[in-house]
Amino acid sequence: MTETTTAATRFAVPGRIAVSGQAASVWQTATLTGIRRETPHAATFRLAVPAWPGHLPGQHLMLRLTAADGYTAQRHYSIASPPDGSGHIELTLDRVPDGEVSGWFHTVARPGDTVEVRGPLSGFFAWPGDRPALLLGAGSGVVPLMSMVRHHRARGLAVPLRMLVSARGPEELIYAAELGPETTPVFTRSAPPGVPVGRMTAAHVAPLLAEQPAGGWEAYVCGSNGFAEHASRLLVAAGQPVERIRIERFG
């Protein structure tokens, strides 16, 4: 995601546009119903979208803010929630310095405010739950991967799923309280006593590739350009076929 430097307060009064269909190409009104703090710099925003057509874990949407003067800003955001037919979706957003959209969400948005959404988008990074999934993420790159983890749990899927997630430190680990035995955190700057500090290495990836489930892993990598390149190289070096690595980058 790329943010620009226009002040977030420009969107103090978001536009309200009526829902006009379920197709991914149609803009729908989404109403903010809740805000949940995840880390000092990230929060989850729950949106009610009554005509949401449903999504697959890993997909994203387009979000649009409209200011009172007609100015608009659009961003792509991964969907954090699993598909559940509730008419609600969740987005977990980092506060980007000088970001006009993330800044609006973190400093202006309140329950009852409305935005517009269009989606779901992209089937390439989607995981329908039908194959073993090896997930590698860094920072807010964990967001679409968490949709997959939540889907795996909610459906009680037996297909193997493992996740490696990198964060600067425990306080920056998004969804820390929700992570379970399927997840191995990697801390790059600070860590609890006895836990090594450093970036993701072959020592984290190779054991998973050495114990592949039947059919092998489908690998999903999400994070910055630098992380995506590093993680994909680790996977290939450990024996993961290139054609079975799906990458989503943000910047």
Image (cartoon, rainbow, N blue to C red):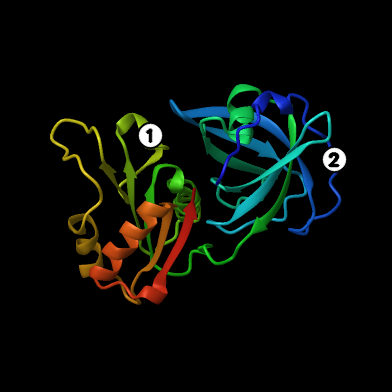
Circle 1 residues within 10 Å: few <14, some 14–19, many ≥20: few
Where on the picture, by quarter, is residue 46?
Answer: top right
User: Is 18 rendered above or below residue 223?
Assistant: above
Position of 53 compared to 151: left or right? right
Q: Are marks 1 and 2 in contact (CB under 8 Å)?
A: no
Where on the picture, by quarter, is residue 25?
Answer: bottom right
Position of 29 compared to 209: left or right? right
Q: Which residue is mark 2?
A: 17
Dot in front, 1 or 2: 2
User: Is 117 rendered above or below residue 5?
Assistant: below
Disc on the earlier residue, 1 or 2? 2
Locate residue 186, reporting x and y percent. Answer: 26, 44
Locate residue 122, reporting x and y percent. Answer: 61, 62
Circle 2 residues within 10 Å: few <14, some 14–19, many ≥20: few
Of the residues shown, which amino acid type is indicated by label 2? Ile
At 72% across and 55% down in the image, what residue appears?
53
Of the residues shown, which amino acid type is indicated by label 1? Ala
Q: Which residue is mark 1?
A: 177
Who is closer to the viewer here, 152 or 251? Answer: 251
**Disc number at residue 189?**
none
Label 1 secondary element: helix
Who is closer to the viewer here, 233 or 178? Answer: 233
Where on the picture, by quarter, is residue 208?
Answer: bottom left
Distance Cα–Cα, label 1 vs label 2:
36 Å
At 40% across and 42% down in the image, what residue appears?
139
Label 2 secondary element: loop
At 62% across and 30% down in the image, what residue appears?
105
Whether residue 204 is visible here, answered yes or no, is yes
